[in-house]
Structures are given as structure tokens and as C-alpha cells.
Image (spheres, helix red, strand yellow):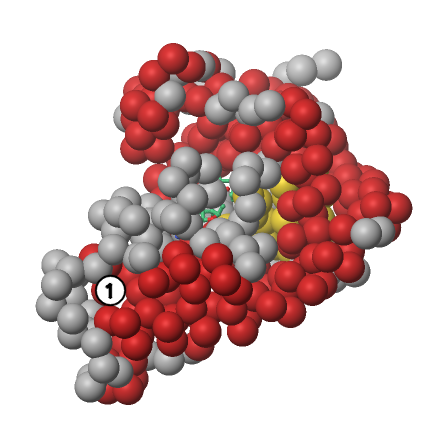
Amino acid sequence: MKKRIYSGTQPTGIITIGNYLGAIKNWLLLQKDNDCIFSIVDLHALTIKQNPEEFKDKSLSFLAQYIACGLSPEKSILYVQSHVLEHTALCWLLNCMTYIGECNRMTQFKDKSKKHEDNINMGLMDYPVLMAADILLYKTDLVPIGIDQKQHLELARNLAERFNARYGDTFTVPDGFIPTVGAKIKSLQNPESKMSKSDSNENASVGILDTPDMILKKFKRAVTDSENKVCYDENRPGISNLINIYCGFTGCSREDVEKQFSDGGYGKFKLAVADAVISVLEPIQKEYAKIMNDKKYLLNVIKEGDEKARNIASKTLREVYDKMGIV
Ligand code: ATP
Ligand code: LTN
């Protein structure tokens, strides 16, 4: 039986190899045999200040990145969150049954509040409720995400159960789909913390559109310890992160990597990681350049995706209004 799959990324910066291994690789896998919807969640991105001139072009660039990675507008619905107004409508209804304590204890809210002290806005706290609305509108079975989003998914599950208990069976309770390797790729400069698209240190993350030279340079500079032994160990986060990246891009197991690189130091291994990443990203970059030249095609994909998404979302919202007694 086909399952309904839903996921999205925020159109900020460029998709990183963290996003790729944590989420998009699984989107590609699930796309083969399921009913998939992938969104560009621009409303979520606005919880952080964005420059309108730059933001304007982000959604098209993200759509091109999705397609270049292998997501297909023929197989899946690819669309922009803000174009389907049902998301914000359902978000409001869910807000009225979400407790403040459920949102202000979220790890991401706390982290982002610390990072953007001058802009701790309501949207930042409400972020997981909007994400729940995204997921529940499409009666989603499975949500492929990195581990950082697990807590938010838990809220979506709770809200679905709460709504169903109060108003009768309406929403599907979604499950997460989190990879075993690559669920949390770490920053190359600070391997204690997550690699993030919006990191201001450009050596910390590798974008899928980085040139081979940049990729090589970033891996050569990646922070490791002084043991110089290619061996997976939670207490040595730098080298363990590089091993995870290598495994994610080659399909090798950690044991294979340790065996294969047992006689070389970090220098040789870093070059191998860069090579593995470059060889997967090169064809994606070629495809991206081609698609970005065809704006008409991209706009058409969005228009069709928006319509298909709106069709599903509007039915669910009508059902929700009905159950809640909204005339
Ligand atoms: P931002 O820096 O703008 O907050 P981000 O890099 O954290 O962005 P998101 O758009 O929030 O990326 O996430 C898109 C998807 O990628 C989500 O499923 C998320 O769990 C996953 N993801 C994000 N960062 C990582 C990472 N470092 N490792 C694995 N998966 C990740
Ligand atoms: N919060 C997610 C992006 C996101 C999402 C979703 C993911 C918004 N809505 C619905 C899966 C399902 C993030 O990656 N930061």
C-alpha cells in the first residue's frame, strides 16, 4: 500500500550535505513507491529576519535544487507552502489547542532564541504548530526528517491525537522516518553542534552547490582531534562526523571505513571524503545549472504543485471546520 509522505526544507542559504543525508536522500528513496509531497517552507523561514531582495529568489532556487537532486514533479507534488493558505488557517485552529508550555520548551525554540536575541518573535515559538499543520493537512503517514525535527514531529502526533479525541477521527497520526547514518551531521568547524544552512561561518557547512575546490578546502580544514586514527568514537566527534559523511555518500559501513583507512592518517581520509562528496554532487550541480536557466519550466512546476497541494489541503480544512462547528 502506498503511503502519504510529507516533508519540507526552509529556503535559507543553500541545501547542505546535512540536509541531503538527513532528509533528501530518504525523500528520493520514498519517492519511488509512495505518494509524496515535498514543500518549500518559506513561512517557516520568515521566523528569522530575511532580506526581501534575496528571499524573493530563494523558492525558485530551492525548487531547482530539489529537482536537481532527483525529486520529480511527475512523481511527487513539489510546491511552496505560502501559496496554499490552508496551512496558516489550520495553524490557527491548532494554536487554539496547543499549550504554551508545549512550544516554549522546544529545543529549537530555545537554541534559535539564544542565537537571535533581538528577534524572539511569536512565529519562532509557533513554528512547530505550523509544521504540525503542514503535516496533518495532507493526512501524512510518514515524515522523513533529520533527528533535530523529532521533537516537532512528536507535537504533530500529539495534536492529531488530541483533535481526534475531541472532535472525532480526522487526522492520521504521522510517524517519523529518520536515517540511521546521517540523522545529525555536525558542523565541520564545531563538531559538537549541528551543520546548518544558515551558519555564518562558511567553512562550517558544505552546500550541494559548492565547487569541488571549495569542498576540498572545507574538508581539509575540518576540525578533528590529534589522534590521527580513522576510528568511529562518540568521544571524538570530528572524525566520527567525517566517517558518517563518508558512509552516507558511499554506502560503506563504519567498519569498512575503519578497515580501509587503518593505515592512513586524517589527511588521506579527508581527501577521500571530499572525493566521495564531490562525485555525488557534480551531476546535481550540472542539472541545477540547466534547470535554473529555464524559469518558465520552474514557474510551471510550482503552479501545478500548488494546485495539487491546495486540492488536498482544502478538503481536509473543510472537514476540520465542519467537525469544529465552523459554519
Ligand atoms: P537553518 O540553518 O535555516 O535552520 P537547517 O540547515 O537546519 O536550516 P532545515 O531547512 O531546518 O535546515 O531542515 C531541512 C531538513 O534537513 C530537516 O528534515 C532537518 O531535520 C534536516 N537537517 C537539517 N540539518 C541537518 C543536519 N545537520 N544533519 C541531518 N539532517 C539535517
Ligand atoms: N521544520 C522543518 C521544516 C518543515 C517540515 C514541515 C518538515 C516545515 N514543515 C513538515 C517536515 C514536515 C525543518 O526542517 N526545520
Q: Residue at x 83, y 46 (%)?
A: 295
Q: Pick whichever, 22 or 311, lies toward us.
A: 22
Q: Residue at x 38, y 13 (%)?
A: 118
Q: Residue at x 70, y 30 (%)?
A: 56
The amino acid type found where label 1 is placed reads Ser
Distance from mark 1 CB to nearest ligand 1 atom below 8 Å:
no
Report x, y in % for residue 288: 70, 57
Report x, y in % for residue 151: 35, 40
**Left or right: 95, with 73 as reference point:** left
Q: Residue at x 54, y 30 (%)?
A: 44
**Which quadrant, please, contains the N terminus?**
bottom right
**Left or right: 282, with 237 as reference point:** right
How many numbered tags mark residues here? 1
Q: Pick whichever, 87 or 314, lies toward us.
A: 87
Relative to 291, say whether 45 is above or below.
Answer: above
Q: Is residue 78 visible?
A: yes
**Left or right: 41, with 79 as reference point:** left
Report x, y in % for residue 270: 33, 69
Picture quadrant of ligand 1: top left
Relative to 189, say whether 237 is above or below.
Answer: below
Residue, disc 1 = 240
Relative to 287, say whether 301 is above or below.
Answer: above
Q: Quadrant of residue 308?
A: top right
Report x, y in % for residue 296: 88, 46
Tell me the SS state at disc 1. Answer: helix
**Which quadrant, please, contains the C terminus?**
top right
Q: Quadrant of residue 73?
A: bottom right
Q: Pick whichever, 75 or 199, lies toward us.
A: 199
Q: Is residue 10 visible?
A: no
Within 10 angstroms of label 1, few (less than 14), some, or many (20 or more) residues?
Answer: many
